[in-house]
């Protein structure tokens, strides 16, 4: 039984590595969100927050979206996006909630003044 528990804990990191991830990158003059992941079938459709996006790559795929597009497709102050991989021939879809970089879609707070007390 202990061997089964150890085997299960060893397998978990491999499964986690297949989950999509998001990272903020530069693309030309603007900032983009690079979303990458894995799909079993290269013909599977990648959707971000319900929108089909062109993915580069076969099994290992990547999508670059301008931050303005991510902001338009997401709820205000969102901390995650939904990434789904749909298999048209099997009529099934897997959905993952992917964490966004901290503060990416947060409202910008403008400070009128900042007071610093030194003791």
Image: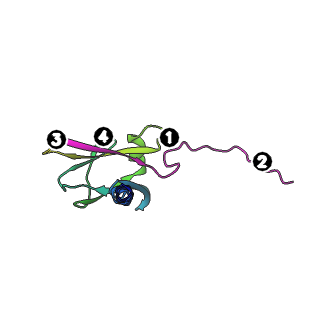
Q: CA distance from mark 2 to mark 1?
A: 27 Å
Closer to the camera in the image, 21 or 107: 21
Q: Which residue is mark 1?
A: 77
Q: CA distance from mark 3 to mark 2?
A: 58 Å
Q: CA distance from mark 3 to mark 1?
A: 32 Å
Residue 35 can be seen in this image: no
Residue 20, percent across and down?
Answer: 35, 53
Helix, strand or loop under label 2: loop
Q: Residue at x 84, y 54 (%)?
A: 118
Residue 107, percent across and down?
Answer: 54, 42
Name the mark nearer the viewer: 2 or 4: 4
Chain-order first, disc 3 or disc 1: 1
Give the crowd class for mark 3: few <14, some 14-19, many >=20 residues within 10 Å: few
Give the crowd class for mark 2: few <14, some 14-19, many >=20 residues within 10 Å: few
Q: Which residue is mark 2?
A: 115
Give the residues drawn in magenta, as a range: 91-119
Q: Which residue is mark 3?
A: 91
């Amino acid at each position: 039984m202990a061997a089964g528990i150890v085997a299960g804990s060893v397998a978990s990191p491999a499964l986690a590595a297949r989950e999509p991830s998001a990272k903020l990158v530069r693309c030309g003059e603007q900032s983009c969100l690079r979303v990458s992941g894995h799909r079993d079938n290269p013909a599977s459709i990648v959707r971000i927050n319900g929108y089909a996006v062109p993915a580069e790559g076969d099994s290992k795929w990547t999508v670059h979206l301008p931050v303005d597009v991510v902001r338009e497709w997401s709820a205000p102050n969102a901390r995650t996006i939904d990434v789904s991989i749909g298999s048209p021939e099997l009529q099934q879809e897997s959905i993952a909630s992917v964490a966004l970089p901290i503060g990416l879609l947060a409202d910008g707070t403008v400070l009128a003044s900042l007071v610093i007390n030194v003791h």
